[in-house]
Amino acid sequence: MSVWLGRVTVVLKASVNDPQGLAVLDGLHAMGYSEVEQVRVGKHIDVRLEADNAEQAEQRLHQMCEALLANTLIESYTVEVGAPEEAAR
Amino acid sequence: MKVGVVTFPGSNGDMDCIHVLEQIPGCEPELIWHKSTDLLSADALVLPGGFAHGDYLRGGAIARFSPVMREVARFAGAGRPVLGICNGFQVLTEAGLLPGALHRNQHILFRCAWVHVRVESNASPWLAGAQSGQVLKVAVAHGQGNYYADQDTLRGMHAREQVALRYSDTAGRISADSNHNGSVLSIAGVTNEAGNVLGMMPHPERSADPLLGSADGRVVFESLVHSLIGVAS
């Protein structure tokens, strides 16, 4: 059993309007970053967890996303599991 | 008739609900702490507004794991009346007891204002005393009341008359101007398929006294009493 670092990213689905992203887009345009076409704001969640291996850690993180970390009606998520030694840092 | 009002850490509309329910003939309101699994033989339940568990992650996301929620789900599943107001509505959607989700208002502002809603369906015990098409002046106070459901869900809800309240103007006309938070189809309140569970973003308990600007919200609590007494007799 080792400690793994799960990196969860939650974003609103493309079909759901993102008022925060639109506000940030307006702000960037106002600052002169006229090249910016779109901004979507999401959440980044770090989860340290014990697991036998990376696959098990990833599977548990997916369950956590479905149960709580994301509302899959309006949000989608991705899960990345770092190497255990990375988590120990 | 006992009405249980659930208090989560961060609820702020619970005492307003108690205050109004005490004035409705036939109602005996009681507070139920979120850690409790005893619904105190309540005949109906209210999940009040506020910021349960700080609204961390998403409004209602953590509150749905409060111990009381398992009993609330059982109560709702038995066809008994449950009302979620504002944050309580968010809790009920997160718990899967109501369809759809509530996310950040389209204009990003926290909106605290008087608005008007049109009663689309009075099939719920919480709106049985209102007329379909009736316009209610009610208070809103939320930052995340932007209702969303996908097209298939909306079609099914429409067919089953689950859309209970929509934002309108004073005459009951529905337009982008009266949709103050960007909700799909201007939806302000929905019910479950059976109709016994109602969630609404406006605050009927803060719109229940003419001295405060409107008493239109009283119809929600009066409807409940009439519906339950009607069922019992």
Image (tube, rainbow, N blue to C red):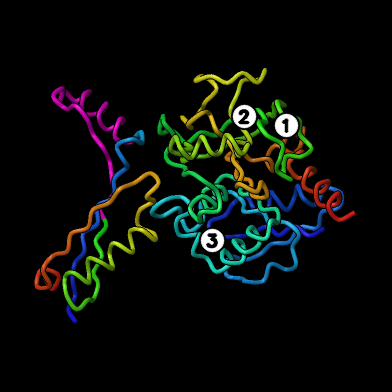
Mark 3 = which residue?
Answer: B9
Would you say B126 lies left or right of B113 here?
right
B117 up-or-down from B43: above or below: above
Cβ–Cβ under 8 Å for marks 1 and 2: yes
For marks 2 and 3, the one nearer the N-term is 3
Q: What residue did someone put label 2 on?
A: B114
Say if B20 sits above or below A38 in the image.
below
Indicate whether residue B14 is drawn in magenta.
no
Q: Give the magenta-colored segment's residue range.
A: A18-44
Asked whether B129 or A29 is in front, the reply is B129
The quarter of the displayed image where residue B128 is located: top right
Most extreme residue toward the bottom is A1
Query: Does the CB distance between marks 1 and 3 fall below 8 Å?
Result: no
Q: Position of residue B159 (x, y in %)?
A: 59, 35
In the rendered image, which residue does mark 1 sit on? Answer: B214
- SS at circle 3: loop
Residue at horizontal 68%, vertical 29%?
B137
Quadrant where the image shows the N terminus of chain B? bottom right
